[in-house]
Amino acid sequence: MRSYAENIFYFELEDIVGPENISKSLVDLDVVSTDVCAISRFWIDQKEEPVKPDYVVYPRNTEQVSKVMKLATNYKVPVTPRGGGAGDTCGSLPLYGGIILNMSRMDKIIKIDENNLTVEVEPGILQCDLEEELNKKGYTLNFFPASHYCSSLGGFLANRGSGTLSSKYGKIDNLVVSMEVVLPNGNIIRTALVPDHSSGPDMNRLFLGSEGTLGIITNTTLKMFYVPEERRFNAFLFNNLENAIDAGRKLMVNRIGASAIRVYDEKDTAVMVKKVLGIDKKGSFMVVGFDGFKEMIDVQEKIAFKIIKETGGQDLGREAGNNWWKNRFKFYYPPFNLESAPVLHGVFDTVATFENILKIYYEQKKEVESNFKKWDITYFGHFSHWYEYGTILYPTFIVNKLPKDIDGLLKLNHEIWKLGIRIALKNGGSVNEHHGIGLRLGRYLKDMYGNGFKMLQDIKNAIDPYNIMNPGKMGFERR
Amino acid sequence: MYIDKHEKTIFEWRFSPMANYICPTFKVTRSESNTPRGLALILFLIRSKKRDFNPASAEKLYQCSSCYLCSSLSYDESDPALLFIDARADIVDKGLAPEAVKNLKDKIRNFNYNKVINFKTSNRKTDIGLFIDPLTAGDNKDEIEANLKLLEKAKVDFTVFGTKRGSGAQLFEIGFRDYAKEIAEMNLKEIETSAIKKIIFLSPYDFRAFSQWYKEMGIKVPKNIELIPYPKFILNLIKEKKIKFRDGKNEKVTYHDSGSYSRIKNGFLEINEILSYISNIKYLPILRSNTKASCDGGDFLQYIYPDIQSSITRRRLDEAVETGARILLTSCFYAKNNFERELNIDSDKANLKIMDLGKYLLEYLEQ
């Protein structure tokens, strides 16, 4: 009888999206059982059974999403939205089975508004495809995340993603004008399509970063820009990390308008910069970028370079800088990406004010390297998304000696993360900067927000009373 | 299993989604199990004995067009495209090849090779062999004649061969290794008993078979045999002033790079150079050209998953139309046939004319 009941549900789903837009084939279920998070990878590597959904559903339009949500609510079946599957937090894993709502067939550009410079687009489009289409007409989003070639727009919105040029253009949040969202009960809401307003709270902000726990984003209007006349990068080398960070701070507090600032610590410079870019230098490598009209960049660069040199930066030239920009994605392809190495690794990116960021860095480095020495651990970091009053720390840990069993691996991973995040929170940092929370970091949101998290849970309960939306994520109550 | 030698490739790509965006099959199915990462993960689960090959995984592996775009993104020797081809050989060994695949194998095996037109060839032993694919020769007789005429005009003495059995390229791609190997061995034997030292390929797939796939089957093409894509050979003739062109007709043309010429060592990437020898024509490259040229639908997909092939071809035609060119040139008869079939369906692109490069060059040949 159980099987018959399940089949009825399947038939109803099929009626909504059509048989060509639903699958319960094992190959389709297996491939959505992972993202790039170390936990999901090790789970599969250790021959554990993949965390599969019951069905993969590919809606074609908002109405279908709405009907699927109504049906799922009726049967109280979990729904986990999925974009490119490139997340780093197990955020799109169907922990309780049910439906994977794969948004990749909702990938159309609806409208390019050349008067207001906005683009209306569906969430399943890959970022690289959206950018390429805009470029053909002379526009850009200026949004170039590391996963530019594999993540969908919906994934960035759901996780508040960030790109290489965020220091000038901000995170994806800053590009959002308006959104259409389908709620768990199937209701479709649209936020205001205006530049800004004081007509109550900004509803966009409720769904940005909600990681599919509150609703499904089905349409977004984003700001876009003219492709800049010029985009330039320049590399510098500092004797020590402190001076490099201070140079970055000065560029930001003086509002010079750098589009990119990236500072690598000494270890990252010695390992990754050398490996990928072939630049073999001791010290802290820095890249600074500007874009826009040539005359404006000339002035910006002149002021910026003066500040950088006065703070101890040695000019490595434009070629090294432009080479970094040209090869920036190379870091994420085999064999350079750490997913292709037989190691345990993780990135606990955090953001804090300028006076706190190096406290976090040094304490994390010291504690992580000393507490997990027997596992042959390496810690290094870079600082890649800058704000007027602080910056990101993007630390990577790599464990070379691994426990043999899955429980040992998960435990080790858990302990390293616990240490890293607690140090970040203790020193005024955040749980995360731009990868999101997902399964991996959910338990720390309570520590970060206190009563604020209780309010988030109340909002979740009100919008999703049956807890069907991406259950088990972001530290919300389990099913 | 054939896939066992790809342990490194599987390991590197099973969790890396960085090549998904470029995969032509994924672009039209939008299904993660069609991506290079998805396929590598499926094969990882099979290798680790968590899953077995089954009809569903076989289907996914045959939906890959073997365009090698994913492999073109590798920064090391890992080769996901070859991994997927090798997986098909395992599927065949396990008797799980889809019916359409078996039908294609029979079609190639039962093809009446004796009926292939006898193209004009030298009546003496020459050191240049012109390899012609018999499977596309019937549909492209005029084009082949034009290409032969170009060689004659340049006073190149050559021997036509390959028409009696082909290279075995398609059989290799769809997993029938024994048959492919048999053909490869016969070709090598023919070369050994001839005076051929240079092989000019009219089909990119045959070029890839000789350059890469024969080695995979343990067959070594002697090092003293030079393998040359036809357009590359023509370019050399132009540079040597053995071929000259008159002025063009103020046309806008574009060119479809075949993956088996552009994404392989010693292949052909110099279309810009060839066309620069004809004045008054404007070459407008497709956005995705050269080593990253999009797939046209390939050589075998049309027989197995024609809807997927058709959608892939249409996307490539869209890219060609975007250039504003009126003529789309190609040096691959499979691509030409794919494009022409699709144009017959899609009247929106009726203004675009598909032409074989050799035939186009012949039009401008200085007499």
Image (cartoon, grey):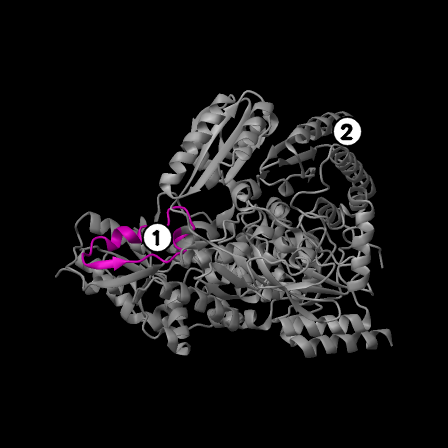
Main SS category, magenta section: loop
Instruction: Give the quarter of the image for residue A24.
Output: bottom right
Residue at image x 38%, y 52%? Answer: B290
Left or right for B112, reference A186: left
Pointer 1 local density, CA inside 10 Å: few below 14, some 14–19, many at least 20: few
Instruction: Check the image and name the residue furthest to the right.
Output: A1
Please tell me which residue lies in front, B28 or A429.
A429
**Placement of A375 over or under A445, stated as above or below:** above
Residue holding disc 1: B193
What amino acid is at disc 2?
Phe
Left or right for A452, reference A287: right
Chain of the residue on which disc 1 is drawn: B
| Residue range highlighted in magenta | B262-290
For residue B276: magenta? Answer: yes
Task: Check contact, mark 2 vs mark 1: CB within 8 A.
Answer: no
* Rendering coords of residue B309 (x, y %): 49, 68
Residue at image x 68%, y 62%? Answer: A27
Whether residue B119 is visible, yes or no, is no
Residue holding disc 2: A372
Q: Nearer the viewer, mark 2 or mark 1?
A: 2
* Rendering coords of residue A368 (x, y %): 74, 29
Chain of the residue on which disc 2 is drawn: A
Numbered tag placed on residue A278 in the rendering: none
Left or right for B35, reference B256: right
Residue at image x 77%, y 53%? Answer: A473
For residue A427: magenta? Answer: no
Secondary structure of residue under mark 2 = loop
Residue at image x 23%, y 57%? Answer: B124
Secondary structure of residue under mark 1 = loop
Please tell me which residue lies in front, B358 or A131.
A131
* Rendering coords of residue B40 (x, y %): 62, 53
Left or right for B82, reference A359: left
